[in-house]
Image: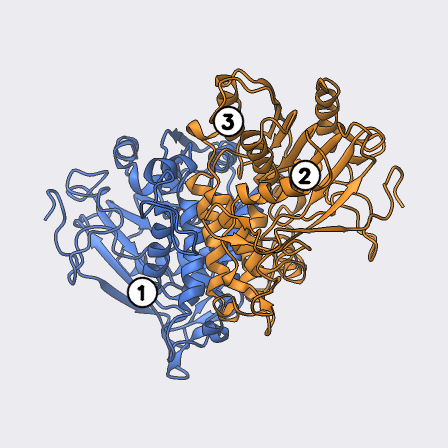
Chain colours: A blue, B orange
Amino acid sequence: MKKESLGIIDAQYFTFAEPPRRLKLQSGRSLGPVTLAYETYGTLNDKKTNAVLVCHALSGDAHAAGLSPDDKTPGWWDGMIGPGKALDTRQYFVICSNVIGGCKGSTGPSSIDPETGKPYALDFPMITIADMVEAQRNLIDHLGIEKLLCVIGGSMGGMQALQWASAHPDRVLSAIPIATALKHSPQQIAFNEVIRQSIMADPAWRKGYYYEHGQPENGLAVARMIGHITFMSDQSMEKKFSRKLKKENLSFQFTDDFEVEGYLRYRGYNFVKRFDANSYLYITKALDYFDLSGDSFLAEIKKTTVRFLVISFKSDWLYPPYQSQEIVRLLKRKHGYTTYSDLTSTYGHDAFLIEVEDETRLIKNFLAHIPQN
Amino acid sequence: MKKESLGIIDAQYFTFAEPPRRLKLQSGRSLGPVTLAYETYGTLNDKKTNAVLVCHALSGDAHAAGLSPDDKTPGWWDGMIGPGKALDTRQYFVICSNVIGGCKGSTGPSSIDPETGKPYALDFPMITIADMVEAQRNLIDHLGIEKLLCVIGGSMGGMQALQWASAHPDRVLSAIPIATALKHSPQQIAFNEVIRQSIMADPAWRKGYYYEHGQPENGLAVARMIGHITFMSDQSMEKKFSRKLKKENLSFQFTDDFEVEGYLRYRGYNFVKRFDANSYLYITKALDYFDLSGDSFLAEIKKTTVRFLVISFKSDWLYPPYQSQEIVRLLKRKHGYTTYSDLTSTYGHDAFLIEVEDETRLIKNFLAHIPQN
């Protein structure tokens, strides 16, 4: 067991929106019942003022820290959450929940539709980042927390942090959006669209109703390979793979000659084992629909009281720094308390998962100065 | 008909390497007979000193200029080749041939294997950029041209220009590699590998033997969509599409809500009609195998007499300017005559097809100063 790890963490589940009190969605449709899988780390204080909500990225889950009970896998942000870490569990009560639409314990397209007794598949309603946040708000209410000390996340997690601050500025003291954007650019939409097309082009996808037959493996694997290229940077790929061959010579065959090819194939097909293809479709669409640009961010507010720490990474070309700078510009117009840091890293978009030391320094300092009124 | 167009241009064909005198390939295998489809523009002078070879990119063909006899489509570089243009056909004899491995008239995987009477499919031998150039050399010999005034091309065409100068420095007076590289980076290999995986994941690919049944449409379309994203820049996509919707509102369905999605789908599925999936596999592999870095470029030569004009584009992230700068550095070590220009353009990799005005200025001036010994 790693030093400073939280040890084994059990998942918890919260179910709400039992019909007829279903969760109303942005699309106009509704969903219920809704289950959220979540984990918590540390202890909620008596005044319930020390809660930090961590939001995960596209293929993340509620297991952000500690070790999973089954295979002892560390959480996806274990370096950031624990005793003495950026989100110090001796001080903060940290919560992470799997988003709706996902496939890691929360209600999503692979969940059983109580009306049919079968997986929802494409009968699952389209969900948005706002819907994900509304589901989380139900969980936060359930935990009896009136104000979150902080909402933090990278990539799609950062969108949720922005959405929380925008929709519930009275329930959030601070927000830390990392490596994220107010809206997807056409290039980001384009990558997601190709990812979706790759899944939907696989006949094994069966128009979404594949659950009796197994995943559309090839389509999903190719989709994930595209994703992986965008998560890394040209530099980090050069450093990791260069043009290293798997064997001594070129094969002059259609095999994976280069290490980078083998890596992509491995990551692509490994993803099939752990992520539902339809969830990938739903969540990428939620990312593309998200748009807090212009007047929609903190719409009702002239001067926000939410404190912001915005972080980007210089080599991130999927969510380039200019998108974080757009967030900062909008916040300045709302006269908000905003700190921005564009961190030097060669890891591309993955940096938000890797650059623990720099993030820890910034986040610890930022959180220490949030006035807990 | 556009002003200054060359008018209707008929394709020509040259067949060589009739067995047993087959073309020896870099893989150790051989190919024969080999047909090259080619077009010529302008007139070869008596001394045969005014020939310029234009090399095409991945999905290009021999139809570089003028109008096709059937549907009057202008050539892919029509803005660059013709009377008064960068490659002025009143002055130069311009040749463009379709690469071997292609599907536009030259011998490739969709050609009939004379031994079986069926398309080669995956029995076609792996080909390399060096093999493409060797085939072109046979054509140049056939045309009676001892020295090419210039070899020019963008992207994969630029690799061929580099390969010509490196393998046949005595047959080339000048070379103009545009938006290209001495070797693919792991990121470039990764994009090509995902393109290949997308095609090969389609059951309609049938391990390459699909010719009786039709193309693996979905896999090839998705592959091309990936390509299209890499050809454009973040800026050019923003300018062209922004987040414009196809209809008034979001659909909350898995349809193409955004214009950029519709564009990608259109370009992807349109490509299926005009390009052979196996050719895409073979040519992407040739791109990935290409490597003139280190000592392999102009290997035998301490001081090259070939004059170079190297051109890159600032917003090209598929073949970033640093790769052109690597070419320039290597040429300096060979004490070559090298001019380099990193052009400002927002069009990304596509710029080499679009920025006709800037290219014309550079190329006209460069060619005017080649001493025709």
Look at discs 1 and 3 and give the one toward the viewer: 3
**Residue type at the position of mark 1:** Lys
Residue that badge 2 annotates: B141
**Residue type at the position of mark 2:** Asp
Circle 1 packing at 10 Å, graded few (<14), some (14-19), many (20+), is: few
Q: Position of residue A178 (x, y in %)?
A: 38, 40
Q: Is residue B72 left or right of residue B245?
A: right
Instruction: Pick out the residue farthest to the bottom.
Output: A116
Q: Is residue A180 visible?
A: no
Decide: is A92 above or below A310.
Answer: below
Point 60% across, 65% down: residue: B114
Q: Position of residue A367 (x, y in %)?
A: 28, 35
Q: Is residue B57 visible?
A: yes
Name the mark on residue A273.
1
Find residue A149 and report its image quarter: top left
Circle 2 packing at 10 Å, graded few (<14), some (14-19), many (20+), is: few
Point 41% across, 83% down: residue: A115
**Residue type at the position of mark 3:** Leu
Residue that badge 3 annotates: B298
